[in-house]
Image (cartoon, rainbow, N blue to C red):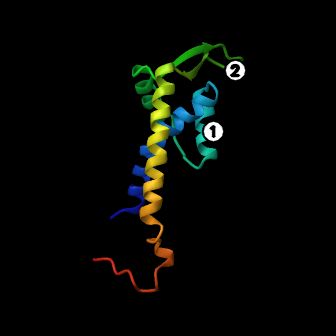
Amino acid sequence: MNTENTKAQMRKGILEFCILSLINEKEMYVSDLIDELKKGKLDVVEGTLYPLLTRLKNGEFLSYRWEESTGGPPRKYYQLTDKGKLFLAELLNTWNELTDSVNLITKNNNPANAPENSFQPNN
């Protein structure tokens, strides 16, 4: 099993939640989102972000406004809609329940705490 693939899938699963959480704090431009995600150690490229933002906008969770830029084309700033705020609240609830469950289940299963040679994966 590929560990990197599993880690990537886990990150993808929480990306939508992280994006909505960031935009909830303040309206954001795509490059601002990418910078904030990188600060949180979630490296995301525009090619991943734009389709997700479009899907969230089409789902009426996000809206946007255009703002003129002094250094190029106008910028699209995203903000949460009322529906998006409700959706984010549901995701936060689910996240808290999920992390509580995972922490409860895994608290005694940390491989770093296991005796040496106690884990023998099947080849």
Quadrant housing the C terminus: bottom left
Could one spot residue 112 in this view of the protein? Answer: yes
| Residue displayed at 58% across by 50% down | 41
Residue 71: image tag: 2
Quadrant housing the N terminus: bottom left
Q: CA distance from mark 2 to mark 1?
A: 18 Å
Asked if 49 appears above or below 4 in the picture, the reply is above
Tell me the amino acid under the disc marked 1: Asp
| Residue displayed at 44% across by 42% down | 94
Badge 1 is on which residue? 35
| Residue displayed at 43% across by 19% down | 60
Residue 67, how many percent across, how many down?
64, 14
Local secondary structure at mark 1:
helix
Could one spot residue 47 in this view of the protein? Answer: no
Residue 77, how many percent across, how many down?
59, 21
- State the residue lying farthest toward the left: 123
| Residue displayed at 46% across by 86% down | 116
Asked if 102 appears above or below 37 in the picture, the reply is below
**Dot 1: within a 10 Å radius of its alpha carbon, few (fewer than 14), some, or many (20 or more) residues?**
some
**Number of numbered callouts drawn:** 2
Q: Left of 96 or right of it: where is 120?
A: left
Q: Nearer the viewer, residue 30 or 85?
A: 85
